[in-house]
Each structure stands twice: as C-alpha cells, then as structure tokens.
C-alpha cells in the first residue's frame, strides 16, 4: 500500500479537514466564519492573532484557522500552513485600491510548499456594499486564471446576508473529500475555467462532487 493510500485511509476514518482562512485586514474573514457557525456578527473587532473554530459540515469535522491580515501579521501566516487541506482567500470586494496588494499576497502564498495541492476558494466578500467589484472583475484583478498549481473557484458572497457562504464551503468540502478520500490518482488538479462562471453554473459544477 502506497503512502498516499495509507494517509487517505487514516484520514477517512477521522473525516477531518483543516481549512485556513486568510486575506488582507478588514476583508471579513472572522465575520464569515461566525456567520457560518450561526454566531452573532455584531461588534466584531480586528483579529490580532488567530481564531480557531471547529464544527461539523456535511458529515466532516472542519478545523478552521482564521488568521489576522494586518501587514505586521502576514509574515506569521507561514506558522499555520502545516497540513492545510484548503485555503479560503477572503477579498473585500469594495476595496479597489488594495486589489494589487491582495493579488500579490495570494500568489505569494501559492508558491509555498506546505500549501501545495490545497484547494483554493476565493470569497469575493461584501457584495452587499454599493460599488463592489463582481466576482468576474476580481477574477481578472487577481489573475486567477493563471493559477495552475491549485484547484480553485471564486464565489461572490456577503458575510452580512450570508449569501453563498454555505455554497462556497460545500465546494471546499467536496473538493477536499474528492482529493483526499476518493481519488486514486494525483493529489493535484488543474485550474478550471468554469470556476468563474455565473453562480448557477458554479453550483452545477459543485454538485458533480456531491
């Protein structure tokens, strides 16, 4: 039995996933996580370190690490890369002035060996705010189509209304489960052009992994 098969067999017993929430400061990472966990989202302060949430979703135990995005904290992100199954990159869709910074930080993360093969979900957050960039605009701004090292998708969402949060998390769980527990070939998957399709098409794609 190969090493990958042994790892897959052991992890299938555990049915656990480690998910890392990253993004620039004020992107809404903590708010999204609290909304997903049905917690109060009023009065949230900037994360000056990290938060850990553990809950069950689609019969999998998700261990989610939410790490602060202030510039002074970003050098410490690497302390949380170990055994990461999925990276959720949260973007403030209303913050047009920092899109280039957002792009550079994301692409730098994707070169890290300890994140190799991790599923990538980009949450285009704050769609409830006037003038927010669409998921298609953010896809272009972040140059997502150039990503060949990770299986990725992007979802427009709102941490305030909850729009598309569960659907995005469903994609993460399905993609990680398909790679770790059910696939018998490569742990890497190619980037998908359909990842930036309208929500209806993206939902249909996600359902393939159900």
Image (spheres, helix red, strand yellow):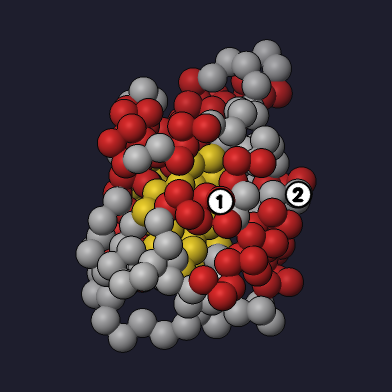
Q: Position of residue 204 (x, y in %)?
A: 31, 29
Q: Which mark is residue 152?
A: none
Q: Residue at x 40, y 37 (%)?
A: 197
Q: Nearer the viewer, residue 52 or 145?
A: 145
Q: Residue at x 73, y 71 (%)?
A: 75
Q: Position of residue 173 (x, y in %)?
A: 41, 39
Q: Quadrant of the C terminus?
A: top left
- Pointer 1 local density, CA inside 10 Å: few below 14, some 14–19, many at least 20: few
Q: Position of residue 129 (x, y in %)?
A: 31, 72
Label 1, on which residue? 140
Q: Nearer the viewer, residue 206 or 199?
A: 199
Q: Indicate which disc, 2 or 1, sits on the residue closer to the N terminus.
A: 2
Of marks 2 and 1, the one in the foreground: 1
Q: Looking at the image, is 39 positioned above or below residue 197?
A: below
Report whether 148 appears left or right of 31.
Answer: right
Is residue 68 visible to us here?
A: no
Q: Nearer the viewer, residue 132 or 45?
A: 132
Element type where label 1 sits in the image: helix
Q: Quadrant of the N terminus?
A: top right
Q: Residue at x 28, y 75 (%)?
A: 41
Report whether 74 appears left or right of 135.
Answer: right
Q: Position of residue 85 (x, y in %)?
A: 56, 43
Q: Residue at x 68, y 72 (%)?
A: 74
Label 2, on which residue? 111
Q: Are marks 2 and 1 in contact (CB under 8 Å)?
A: no
Q: How far apart, in angstroms, are the residues tagged by discs 2 and 1?
A: 19 Å
Element type where label 2 sits in the image: loop
| Quadrant of residue 97 within the rendered picture | bottom right
Q: Looking at the image, is 98 positioned above or below residue 124?
A: below
| Quadrant of residue 35 within the rendered picture | bottom left
Q: Looking at the image, is 37 positioned above or below residue 191?
A: below
Is residue 198 visible to us here?
A: yes
């Amino acid at each position: 039995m190969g090493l990958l098969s042994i790892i897959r067999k052991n992890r299938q017993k555990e049915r656990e996933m480690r998910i890392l929430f990253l993004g620039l400061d004020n992107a809404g990472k903590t708010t999204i996580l609290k909304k997903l966990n049905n917690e109060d989202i009023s009065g949230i302060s900037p994360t000056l370190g990290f938060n850990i949430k553990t809950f069950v979703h689609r019969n999998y135990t998700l261990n989610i690490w939410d790490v602060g995005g202030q510039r002074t904290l970003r050098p410490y992100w690497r302390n949380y890369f170990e055994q990461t199954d999925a990276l959720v990159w949260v973007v403030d869709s209303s913050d047009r002035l920092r899109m280039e910074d957002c792009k550079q930080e994301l692409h730098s993360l994707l070169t890290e060996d300890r994140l190799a093969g991790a599923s990538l979900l980009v949450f285009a957050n704050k769609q409830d705010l006037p003038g927010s960039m669409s998921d298609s605009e953010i896809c272009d701004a972040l140059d997502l189509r150039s990503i060949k090292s990770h299986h990725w998708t992007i979802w427009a969402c709102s941490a305030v209304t909850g729009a598309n949060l569960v659907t995005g998390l469903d994609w993460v769980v399905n993609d990680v489960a398909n790679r770790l527990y059910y696939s018998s070939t490569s742990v890497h998957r190619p980037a998908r052009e359909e990842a930036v399709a309208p929500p209806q098409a993206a939902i249909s794609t996600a359902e393939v992994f159900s």
